[in-house]
Amino acid sequence: MEKHIVSFSGGKDSTAMLLMMIEKGMRIDEIIFLDTGVEFPEMYEHIKKVKQYINRDITVLKAEKSYEYYMLEHVKTRGKNKGQKGYSWADFRNRWCTSNLKQQVIKRYLKKYKDFEIIEYHGIAIDEQKRLEKNKNKNVRYPLAEWNMTEANALQYCYDKGFNWGGLYTKFDRVSCFLCPLKSLKELKVIWKDFPHLWAIMRDYDSRTYRKFRSDYSILELEKKFIKEIEDEKNK
């Protein structure tokens, strides 16, 4: 017996994949959205809109503890930093947010299907070869790649269906958690400039943790950098 599970992040690729799978009449037993708690508000609105559009349930999974808890309060119980409070900001070497808020949550949830063969569907486009190669040995299908859909194709398909994420994709290449330190400086500048309410949350977290937001900049240092860039532009 099989269970066909759609991994729905809410981004352009997973949205296009889900809508096309439904159009093509493909089997879908469950649609799962992993809520980190730190998505853009526009993303939550998009999830609601998709649910209404497809008229199907979307299972929303969330870790028992919040992003803020893991970042600032969780006490490490092993390793060289045993006893240290909070994981602090994530980086390329320690993406604790992905592990604690997504991977472990879905792993625990799917145990309910232990008597089934699980087929997962992930939204990875044909032009994301590195990601496809990395995951090729897992029991996962990539319909967009199978259909030769590029990221640009997926985004346009969603736009044609009336989904625009409140304009997020006109500002960002990827619509991931708003406070991710792995965003480019260009994207971080957009958050500082256009999403001050979200930047205020990042500022607060940065003031309460032991590691810089990035290895090269704290949140306050980024603010100074962005202000100087704007002043320099004015003085040209």
Image (cartoon, rainbow, N blue to C red):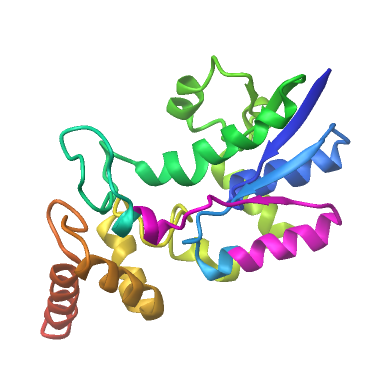
Vertical position of residue 116 compared to residue 152: above or below: above
Q: Is residue 162 visible?
A: no
Q: Where is residue 167 in the image (x, y as percent from the top left)?
A: 54, 69
Q: Position of residue 77 (x, y in %)?
A: 28, 39
Q: Which residue is drawn at 48% across and 47% down?
A: 101
Q: Is residue 7 visible?
A: yes
Residue 107 in which image quadrant = top right
Q: Residue at x 27, y 53 (%)?
A: 86
Vertical position of residue 68 compared to residue 30: above or below: below
Q: Where is residue 62 in the image (x, y as percent from the top left)?
A: 57, 52
Q: Which residue is drawn at 46% across and 29% down?
A: 131
Please, which residue is most extreme toward the top here?
Answer: 137
Left or right placement of residue 106 versus residue 1 in this view: left
Q: Is residue 179 magenta?
A: no
Residue 67 in which image quadrant = bottom left
Vertical position of residue 233 compared to residue 53: above or below: below
Vertical position of residue 107 compared to residue 10: above or below: above
Q: What stretch is highlighted in magenta?
A: 44-70
Q: Does the magenta stretch include residue 52?
A: yes
Q: Where is residue 27 in the image (x, y as percent from the top left)?
A: 85, 32
